[in-house]
Amino acid sequence: PAPAPQCIDHTLPINWSGGGIYDCEYYNNHGGTAYCAHAELDAACCFCGGGDHDGGAVPVPVTTPAPGVCTDNELPIEWSGGGVYDCAYYDNHGGTAYCAHAVLDAACCFCGGGVVHTQAPAPAPVAAPGDPCDVHADKTTCLTVEGCSWKQEEAFCIEAPLTATCQQWDGKRRRCKNEGCKWRSGTSKCKGYWG
């Protein structure tokens, strides 16, 4: 008889391992295959059909978020509690009040941080003939031209978005400013630069 194939569990990501406290065996003994509904455990744990079988790595599918979708960055251990807490936790337990902390402001989509996935890098902007918003203008010059706004993240002058567009970033200071909108600190509202 042929020996039974061996399977070796993968190391779990920090948000499932609690900084190395939990492994696949723990989840198998505390809920079993119900945990296999989570992609990370399904790919990493032998009891879910994942892991390394007989020394050969099982390919783990890599998914790329759709363009325009924001993905939270991984939190440092002092904020994640060794992988126990993530941005969703802080969003659901205090929300934007946590955005005052630079780490969460930079890492979490609900604060305007995180990573917004794009299809491809946009070409460098070029001012159209007669376009009053000269993309090569400095910030001070840009903001003196009515109808123009400064796109902070890319550092160029754009046609200012309207308040109706900017309102989607209420409560998200960094995203508001990165999109060329004006942030109202007292109200945490995002407004169009010129109305």
Image: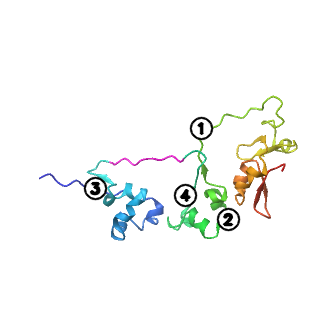
Q: Which residue is mark 3?
A: 7
Q: Is residue 105 above or below residue 56?
A: below
Sequence-first tag of 1 and 3: 3
Residue under pointer 4: 74
- Tell which circle, 2 or 3, labels the residue nearer the N-terminal end: 3
| Location of mark 1 (residue) | 120
Look at label 4 and name its amino acid: Glu
Residue 173, how many percent across, how many down?
72, 57
Q: Earlier in the sequence, mark 4 or mark 2?
A: 4
Instruction: Name the spot of residue 8 as percent of width and height, x first.
Output: 30, 56
Could you tell me which secondary element the residue under label 1 belongs to?
Answer: loop
Is 161 left or right of 8, judged from the image as shown? right
Q: Please provide the residue range marked out in magenta.
A: 57-65
Point out which mark residue 96 bears.
2
Dot 3: what SS? strand
**Left or right of 131: which side holds 154?**
left
x then y, percent, for residue 103: 63, 61
